[in-house]
Amino acid sequence: MESIEVAEQLKAAERGAAAPYVDYPPTPWWYAPSVGAWVAAMIGTFTWWRENAGLFVGSLVALIAVEILFITWMRRRHGALPMPGKGTPPVEIAGVWRGYAAALPVIALLVAAAWLLGGVPAAALAGFVLVTAGLAVYERRYAVAAAKTRARLQ
Amino acid sequence: MIDDLDPVIHVPKRLAAMAVLANAPSVSFRFLKDHLRLTESDLSKQMSTLESAGYVSAAKDGHGRGSSTTYRITKAGQHAYERHCAALRALIGGS
């Protein structure tokens, strides 16, 4: 077998492997604030935990249902939504995912600090602002990494 | 080394399809068609071959014009794909 043919096969496999990560429809503008609002609502739900068990459980179920519907919609819209733990992301994307994973505990700590200092309303507000801003930064970094990957694999 | 090359996956269209499937929990027919730049009939043919080999499973949502088909890689398919890629890398390394 010609080595050039093998190299082309490997390149085709690499392009295919990268496709779910770099071929995606534009992220809608409301994505980051919606996730921020979802996190704020999840934090706010804990207010009802102490006051009304029925409202707490109802809110929790509704928020989880919204999350499931959202992921289902995202998966259908994308067509091949990559998920952590499945496959091997391109090096450029893996770096952005590591940054995302590192930022999560920092945001959780900041929200917890807001909770301690200002109670549930402060935590919900901090959750909304930090998650919205964090996701907006993540989306920008991801788009740059995806463009670099596409350029490398051309 | 060359014996590890899988004749089903060795066809470039099917190798690329397997590479996509190995990196997402499920992949739509439309995504594969757009990425591989194949006609619907050609993609259907390639995916049928992969299904017959037990490398992918297909699921259909809905009926008629609004229906959509999604594919998932099976464990056997994942294993075959990894083995095939390892064989290709070994060939490059040894050439």
Image (cartoon, coloured by chain):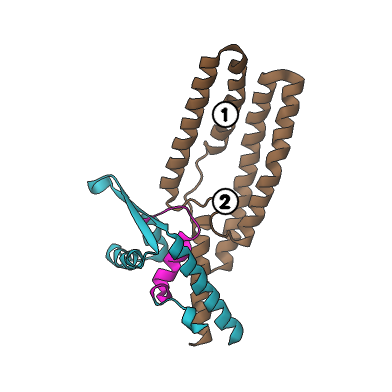
Chain colours: A brown, B cyan
Give the letter of the chain under mark 2. Answer: A
Quadrant of residue B28 within the rendered picture: bottom left
Answer whether labels 2 and 1 touch (C-beta < 8 Å).
Answer: no
Horizontal and vertical percent position of residue B45: 29, 67
Residue, far front:
B76
Residue, far top:
A51
Answer above or below: position of B56 versus A85: below
Horizontal and vertical percent position of residue B38: 34, 66
Answer above or below: position of A14 versus A129: below
Of mark 2 and mark 1, the one earlier in the sequence is 1
Mark in the foreground, 2 or 1: 2
Q: Is A87 one of the magenta-colored residues?
A: no
Q: Secondary structure at mark 1?
A: helix
Q: Amino acid at mark 1?
A: Ala
Q: Residues within 10 Å of mark 1 (few under 14, many from 20)?
A: some
**Image quadrant in which the C terminus of chain B is located:** bottom right
Disc 2 from disc 1: Cα separation: 23 Å
Circle on res. A84 = 2
Q: Main secondary structure of the magenta part?
A: helix
Quadrant of residue A128 within the rendered picture: top right
Answer above or below: position of B23 versus A13: above
Say which residue label 1 marks: A37
Stretch of the chain drawn in magenta: B8-29
Q: Residues within 10 Å of mark 2 (few under 14, many from 20)?
A: few
Q: Is B11 one of the magenta-colored residues?
A: yes
Identified at 48% across, 68% down, the residue is B81
Circle on res. A8 = none
Relative horizontal placement of residue A28, taking residue B29 as reference (left or right): right
Q: Secondary structure at mark 2?
A: loop
Identified at 52% across, 25% down, the residue is A60
Q: Amino acid at mark 2?
A: Pro
